[in-house]
Image (cartoon, rainbow, N blue to C red):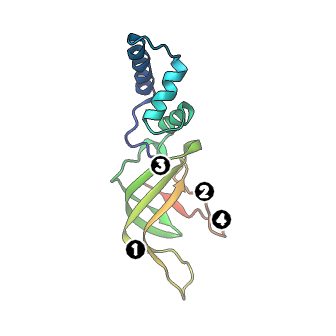
Amino acid sequence: MTTENLPSIATLKAQAKRLRQALSWDGVSITHGRALEITALTWGYRDWNTLHATASAPIWSGKLALGDRLTGDYMGHPFEAELVGATAMSGGYVRVNLRFAEAVDVVQHESFSALRKQVTAVVGPDGRSRSKTSDGTPHMVLRS
């Protein structure tokens, strides 16, 4: 799931508190923990822990927003791209979906070419992908 519409943890906890209070007005008593779980379900998450982790995960140095123009290197080739998707993952990693301004050749062999206009990669808080080429170079390095 994406985090683009998720409120802060404090707002989510306040929602759970309001839910608990509203139910008590109807004579239904639930624990705060149960209210947190119900809040997670209403946001489409299986439980509070998953929602909490997603809502509090940093999006690449806190700088990513859909539509951002980014530059960097992909498979050793420089690029300019638009961020068309971002999904927070554990450990501060983010799955990014980029649409390149100009197609990027993803092959480094001089007698073969494979152009890509859009790619998905997982980058860490440092803007570097976990996956690497055989020489140890990250598949993607984001600069801005």
Nearer to the camera, 88 or 129: 88
Q: Residues within 10 Å of mark 2 (few under 14, many from 20)?
A: some
- Mark 4 lies on a secondary structure that is loop
Instruction: Give how far apart the Cα atoms at labels 4 and 1 are.
Output: 23 Å
Name which residue type carries label 3.
Thr
If you read the primary sequence from the N terminus, does the residue marked by circle 1 or circle 2 appear first? 1
Q: Residues within 10 Å of mark 1 (few under 14, many from 20)?
A: some
Residue at 50% x, 66% y: name it. Answer: 74
Instruction: Give how far apart the Cα atoms at labels 1 and 2 are.
Output: 22 Å
Please identify the residue farthest to the front as the structure is shown.
27
Q: Residues within 10 Å of mark 3 (few under 14, many from 20)?
A: some
Contact check, label 3 and label 4, Cβ < 8 Å? no
Nearer to the camera, 44 or 49: 44
Instruction: Give how far apart the Cα atoms at labels 2 and 4 are.
Output: 10 Å
Residue at 52% x, 32% y: name it. Answer: 52
The spot of residue 140 in percent (x, y) is: 52, 61
Disc 4: which residue: 136
Nearer to the camera, 26 or 48: 26
Determine whether 105 is above or below 47 in the image: below
Disc 1: which residue: 103
If you read the primary sequence from the N terminus, does the residue marked by circle 2 or circle 3 appear first? 3
Residue 87 numbered mark, or none: 3
For residue 136, side relative to residue 51 (left or right): right
Q: Nearer the viewer, mark 2 or mark 4?
A: 2
